[in-house]
Amino acid sequence: MLQEAQHFGRFHDRIESVHVTNDFFSAILFDCDGVLVDSEPITHSVLRAMLMELGWDISERETLERFVGKSFLDERRIIHEHTGHLIDEKWIEKFRVRRDAALRAGLAPIPGAVEAVRQVAEAMGQSFACVSGADRGKIEMQLGIAGLDELFGDRVFSGMEMAHSKPAPDVYLAAAAALGVEPSTTAVVEDSVAGIQAGVAAGATVFAFAPVGRPYSPVEQLLAAGAHHVLECMSDLPSLLLDVSTLRKSA
């Protein structure tokens, strides 16, 4: 695996007709929230409102920094420490109802994501998947809103259905197994520290999506988590995969 992370910005000098190739990576595994759809601000606005209802005077920025890429069940202790409430499945279900309503009203794809997935689909056949830490209902709803559901088909994997969600590698290992490939030969596209840690733990080559101005998961944190490559625009992903496909992994 490449030992040094490389930071790639915009590829304005690239030829527009560049396509990805599957000569190097056996499969491309996309996270969903923050990579394919711009859901994090919406989801965490709802979360913040509900935490404030429990008595935690938490800012929008702290909500994003604390909870992006993490499971509620893994963060119950933190919520209890700040609110005195131990959240349960009933509370989580209420959150999901409010969250889903907000997402249906305002969700949009990440700029460039739909076309990037289309190019990956053209080059990889069915050797790509959506691999998220979120619950399946949310993932499938968001892919439908973004117009990506038909591209991914049934190749959708939820960390909530695994013994351990991200940052554990379980969901990436399950996706690779379902696709019939070795995890170490896959490329993972992530945007959170927990997600990058999961991809690295699975042995994948991890691409960190870090658009300029995003108020959470700064580049420094993503690199520290083990990201091998960083990109600022999702539209750059196909050409970046093409560049990296000419490199050889070290042992």
Image: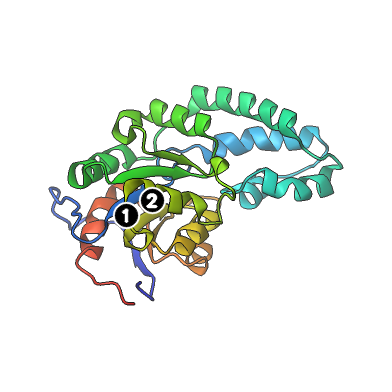
Q: Secondary structure at mark 2?
A: helix
- Which class describes the residues within 10 Å of circle 2: few (<14), some (14-19), or many (20+)? few
Q: Position of residue 130 (x, y in %)?
A: 40, 42
Q: Residue at x 63, y 25 (%)?
A: 98
Q: Position of residue 243 (x, y in %)?
A: 22, 63
Which image quarter is the N terminus in? bottom left
Which residue: 43% across, 46% down? 31
Neighbour tally class for label 1: few under 14, some 14-19, many 20 plus, Cα within 10 Å: some
Q: Which residue is mark 1?
A: 181
Display colour scheme: rainbow
Residue 251 screen position, x and y as percent: 34, 77
Which residue bears the numbered disc 2? 177
Judge from the rendering whether residue 248 lies leftward or rightward of residue 195; answer left or right. left
The type of residue carrying mark 2 is Ala
**Residue at 45% over, 58% down:** 199
Residue 84 visible, this angle:
yes
Rendered view: 99 above or below 182: above
Please name the amino acid that badge 1 sits on.
Val
Q: Nearer the viewer, residue 182 or 241?
A: 182
State whether residue 217 appears in this view.
no
Residue 86 in percent (x, y) is at 81, 40
Alpha carbons under labels 1 and 2: distance apart: 6 Å
